[in-house]
Amino acid sequence: MRETVNVYDAKSRFSRLLARVEAGDEVVISRHGRPIARLVPYQPDPVVRRPGIWKGQITIGADFDDFSGTDERDWYGE
């Protein structure tokens, strides 16, 4: 739901308006009947993933997937 309030009301009811925004509402703040700002719930910036960023910096040992000895029993409960 969208509500429009003037600057004076926004200053005097700021905590209540923030509670409404936290609940998912949107509040438009106006001055002299003209919208000047909009309070909306915070959305963090999406994390940009770049494949290959660690290329050449990490090595995997040759025995990484060697399950010989007790390791196999630990994994498979034998």
Image: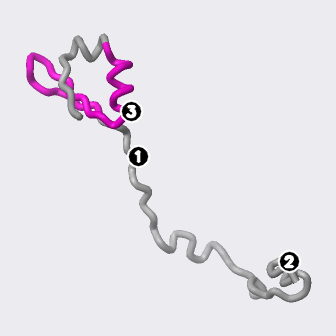
Q: Observer-nearest residue: 24 or 28?
A: 24
23 part of magenta stretch: yes
* Residue tagged 1: 44
Figure label count: 3
Please, what secondary structure does the residue beneath circle 1 have? loop
38 part of magenta stretch: yes
| Percent of width and height locating residue 38 | 23, 31
Please, what secondary structure does the residue beneath circle 3 have? helix
Amino acid type at circle 1 is: Pro
Amino acid type at circle 3 is: Glu
Residue in view at x 39 percent, y 49 percent: 45
* Residue 50, picture quadrant: bottom left
Do the CB atoms of the residues marked 1 and 3 lie less than 8 Å apart?
A: no
Mark linked to residue 53: none
Which callout, 1 or 3, points at the residue further toward the start of the chain?
Answer: 3
* Residue 70, picture quadrant: bottom right
Q: Which residues are magenta?
A: 13-39
Q: Is residue 66 left or right of residue 21?
A: right
Q: Nearer the viewer, mark 1 or mark 3?
A: 3
Q: Is residue 1 above or below residue 55?
A: above
* Residue tagged 2: 74
Q: Observer-nearest residue: 2 or 69?
A: 2
Disc 1 to disc 3, C-alpha distance: 14 Å
Residue in view at x 80 percent, y 78 percent: 75
Q: Is residue 14 left or right of residue 69?
A: left
* Residue tagged 3: 22
Which callout, 3 or 2, points at the residue further toward the start of the chain?
Answer: 3
Please, what secondary structure does the residue beneath circle 2 have? helix
